[in-house]
């Protein structure tokens, strides 16, 4: 069953002496019984050594014939990452990994099925790392990174660069953002959802998680129909969330979404048009969106549009930087829902 977790993770020490005893490789002893434990001591060490030596043959020798494709995919992706560390301590096989210049590592615990000491399969997992069953393309440029199970990383790196510049211009450094933006492109809609455990995906084609590193996750299938402008627009919205990081958890939902929409709206005509169309169907007195509206396909467009209006009203009343500086301790701003609703109405009237 699903047995993969991401958690805050400091580097672990490498394997101890017990593991070193079987460093020679993964080939099972002739009479080894078939076993299906979580992981044998030594597997991680053998895989790690093969990775360090960039020895694909030694690496895939740790997989059964039926799982060689999986082994090849892991070898290809892992040799492209900035950091990969493997451990099989405490009965769990864990991968610590990092894309490009990401300041934080992520950790995935994998449930392996072994045959004769070799990897025979990996269990489905939610959330699943985007590389779980695919050789991923990796592209990085300073604090920008892309990990693409679709094999198409460079167009996303371009879009991430555009988005990160916009997010920076929008004053995100006021929240402590350092300019990093990492995008993961899932192979298809199913894997997008598997990648998304705990996140609120709904009908969206992208979202932001932190594990602990904030990353934008994109549905690679849906994205095939997107123009470069759409990609940059989507990453701008999600990039604002990535820049908000953990402070987003402390904000009312309308505020976190409204800030992302307010930054994105002037830069993405298709998004602005969608907001305008959604508003046209709503009565003038409608106020702040409730949290549930953001995940209701019938209500979401109107919810985002109203959230953007409310933030635009706040910015008009107080100035962007002052509003941004309030975000880490929003309650201290003294702005209640009554005032935010009035500002939303004023902004809507101003736009006609
Ligand atoms: Zn959002």
Image (cartoon, rainbow, N blue to C red):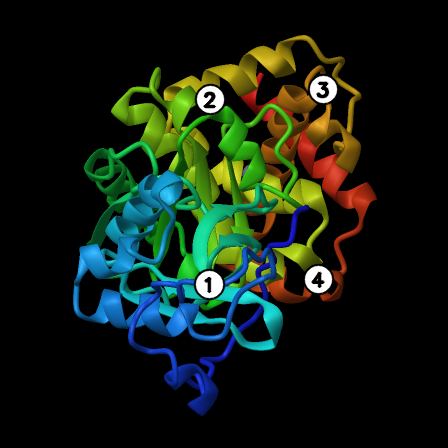
Instruction: Say whether residue 102 is left or right of residue 95.
Output: left
Q: Quadrant of residue 314?
A: top right
Classify residue 235 as left or right of residue 282.
Answer: left
Q: Nearer the viewer, residue 122 or 153?
A: 122
The local crowd at label 4, few if under 14, some if 14 to 19, many if 20 or more residues have their Cα within 10 Å, is few
Q: Whole-percent x and y of residue 349?
A: 64, 22
Measuring from the top left, give residue 162's x and y in whole percent.
Answer: 26, 41
Q: In whole angstroms, how far apart are the C-alphas of marks 4 and 1?
A: 70 Å
SS at mark 2 in the image: helix
- Which residue is denoted by mark 2 in the rendering? 272
N-terminal of the pair, mark 1 or mark 2, is 1
Residue at the top extreme?
281
Q: Is residue 291 left or right of residue 91?
A: right
Tell me the CA gap for discs 3 and 4.
28 Å
SS for tag 4?
A: helix
Q: Which residue is mark 1?
A: 31
Name the residue carrying label 4: 333
């Amino acid at each position: 069953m699903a047995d993969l977790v991401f958690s805050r993770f400091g580097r672990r020490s490498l394997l101890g002496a017990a593991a070193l005893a079987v460093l020679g490789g993964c080939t099972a002893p002739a009479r080894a019984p078939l076993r299906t434990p979580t992981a044998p001591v030594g597997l991680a060490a053998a895989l790690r050594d093969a990775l360090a030596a960039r020895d694909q043959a030694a690496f895939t020798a740790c997989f059964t014939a039926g799982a060689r494709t999986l082994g090849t995919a892991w070898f290809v992706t892992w040799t492209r990452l900035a950091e990969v560390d493997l451990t099989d301590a405490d009965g769990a096989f864990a991968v610590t990994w990092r894309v490009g210049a990401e300041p934080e590592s992520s950790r995935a615990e994998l449930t392996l099925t072994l045959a004769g000491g070799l990897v025979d399969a990996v269990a489905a997992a939610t959330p699943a790392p985007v590389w779980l069953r695919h050789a991923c393309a990796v592209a990085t440029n300073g604090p920008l990174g892309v990990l693409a199970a679709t094999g198409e990383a460079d167009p996303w790196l371009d879009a991430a660069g555009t988005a990160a510049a916009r997010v920076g211009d929008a004053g995100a450094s006021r929240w402590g953002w350092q300019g990093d933006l990492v995008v993961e492109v899932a192979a298809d809609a199913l894997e997008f959802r598997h990648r998304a455990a705990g996140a609120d995906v709904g009908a969206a084609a992208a979202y932001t998680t932190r594990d602990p590193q904030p990353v934008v996750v994109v549905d690679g299938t849906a994205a095939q129909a997107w123009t470069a402008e759409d990609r940059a627009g989507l990453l701008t919205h999600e990039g604002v969330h990535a820049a908000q990081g953990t402070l987003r958890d402390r904000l009312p939902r309308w505020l976190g979404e409204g800030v992302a929409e307010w930054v994105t709206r002037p830069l993405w005509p298709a998004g602005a048009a969608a907001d305008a169309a959604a508003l046209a169907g709503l009565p003038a007195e409608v106020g702040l969106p409730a949290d549930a509206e953001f995940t209701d396909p019938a209500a979401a467009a109107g919810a985002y549009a109203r959230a953007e209006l409310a933030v635009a009203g706040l910015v008009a009343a107080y100035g962007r930087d002052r509003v941004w500086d309030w975000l880490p301790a929003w309650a201290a701003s003294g702005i209640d829902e009554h005032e935010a609703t009035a500002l939303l109405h004023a902004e809507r009237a101003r736009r006609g």
